[in-house]
Image: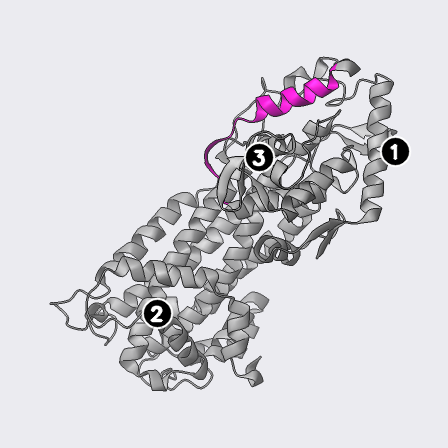
Amino acid sequence: MVELTGHSLTIKEVKQVIYHDAYVTASPASVKRVEESRQAVEKIVDEKKVIYGITTGFGKFSDVFIDSKDVEQLQLNLIHSHACGVGDPFPEKVSRAMLLLRANALLKGYSGVRPVIIERLIELLNAHIHPVIPQQGSLGASGDLAPLSHLALVLMGEGEVFYKGERVDALSALSKEGIAPVTLKAKEGLALINGTQAMTAMGVINYIEAEQLAYESEAIAAITIEGLRGIIDAFDADVHQARGYKQQINVAKRVREYLNDSQLVTKQGELRVQDAYSLRCIPQVHGASWQALDYVKEKLEIEMNAATDNPLIFDGGEKVISGGNFHGQPIALAMDFMKIAVAELANISERRIERLVNPQLSDLPPFLSPEPGLQSGAMIMQYAAASLVSENKTLAHPASVDSIPSSANQEDHVSMGTIGSRHAHQIIQNVRRVLAIELICALQAAEYRGVEKMSSFTKALFHEVRSVVPSIKQDRIFSKDIEQAAKWLYEVNWEELREEILPKSQL
């Protein structure tokens, strides 16, 4: 079970909810804060105070006063008019994360919603009713207005949801689960859509997937080192301590653990004096990507527990301030940083693939072919990897450097953070396939060298993956192998597998 407080949600807990269906509740203390905040909003409406978003219009219409009799209509109009998302929907896991993060943000007690709004969000989570939310249409400032409007529609019994494997009308799914739609009261529509939960939810899913890929990339690289008879000296602890980056030190340590008793690695001067950078600099390059991922994780965990709507209510309603916490710049920059960091894992991986298949760069069979000339082997797998790496370079262009004014120039600088998070997700899918190709080629090279000479860890990993991708005995439709390997990389519980096959003395 995961209890939401508005202040303490972690990526580990998000993972439990999104991937392992942990039951979600709200802490009583947080609900009490929400009730107090709501009383402040109702007092503002009763006293006809002019407060943005509560008794006024939105954006450029902030100077238009709204009478108390029209506040419900105002919220309904807001959600209907702002539900302008287009394109394919976010993956269900992202939609699920958006529900979780929105509930957590509202529990901070600065937003002025009734507790029932948060109850409904949590009920949707626990019933596995996930709003259909189009991916495109957010500028990433004033919050993720369009995506979150599609989420808000579902609370009202409108829009569509994913429910039990099908895409259905929201009202139908709510009825089957005995969940009553809500009528939004003063400020509640604005509180639901003024926030960064689309980009942050996508960002958290990205981080979870990228973290696993980063770990997997090291183990795959270790097999490649064996296939190329790489020099283990470059991973010596003293080398990395001398530079001082903890992430670099940790990557080198893990690679040493994976290759601990390998008979395929070499010492400097045994076959050659030094390896190419794509082998020798694995700790430096992968370590730098880990530095970026650590930065991204820090920013995401702050944002997951942030109040990002507008206005915010303090001191029991004595202080209501229109600010700009909805601006997605912190996450926009983090997603752009993530794009570059994860893309680099594929960039260096593709260079290792080239060394595995190019007969001018190793003594392995040309293109790892069982019959060079008659059979092409892994020749075109390297093409596919190169194509994905090139595509990533385009996707890695920072979204956050762009801005287009909106709302008649009232909102004259925006983050484009949601675009950044979506592009990061695309890059991650491409990287997984590049690593799948390296894995296939590395296994083939290690098999050529002699599986019995592999380390205890890589040998166990070899047999694990061989149940998914068989040895290349003759040319076949390698697209299927790449997708199978990528699927395995996505689905495997890497932490459990590592603990299972790494000798206990090395853990």
* Relative image position of residue 91 (x, y in whole percent): 50, 45
Q: Nearer the viewer, residue 232 or 200?
A: 200
Q: On the rendered image, what quadrant is the C terminus found in?
A: bottom right
From the image, state whether disc 3 or disc 2 is nearer to you: 3
Q: Nearer the viewer, residue 90 or 369?
A: 90
The reply to whether residue 133 is in sight is no
Task: State the residue position of label 3.
Answer: 172
Task: State the residue position of label 1.
Answer: 316
Q: Is residue 105 left or right of residue 37?
A: left
Q: CA distance from mark 1 to mark 2?
A: 64 Å
Marks 1/2 in contact by CB < 8 Å: the verdict is no
Element under disc 2: loop
Q: Amino acid at mark 3?
A: Ser
Task: State the residue position of label 2.
Answer: 276
Above or below residue 313? Residue 25 is: below
Residue at 57% of width from left, 74% of height from top? 241
Residue at 43% of width from left, 49% of height from top? 427
From the image, state whether disc 1 or disc 2 is nearer to you: 1
* Relative image position of residue 71 (x, y in whole percent): 74, 19
Residue at 36% of width from left, 83% of height from top? 264
Q: Amino acid at mark 1?
A: Gly
Above or below residue 170? Residue 338 is: below
Task: Provide the residue span drawn in magenta.
Answer: 70-91
Above or below residue 486? Residue 404 is: above
Q: CA distance from mark 1 to mark 3?
A: 38 Å
Label 2 Cα crowd, 10 Å radius (few <14 / some 14-19 / many 20+): few
Q: Amino acid at mark 2?
A: Ala
Residue at 80% of width from left, 17% of height from top? 50
Element under disc 3: helix
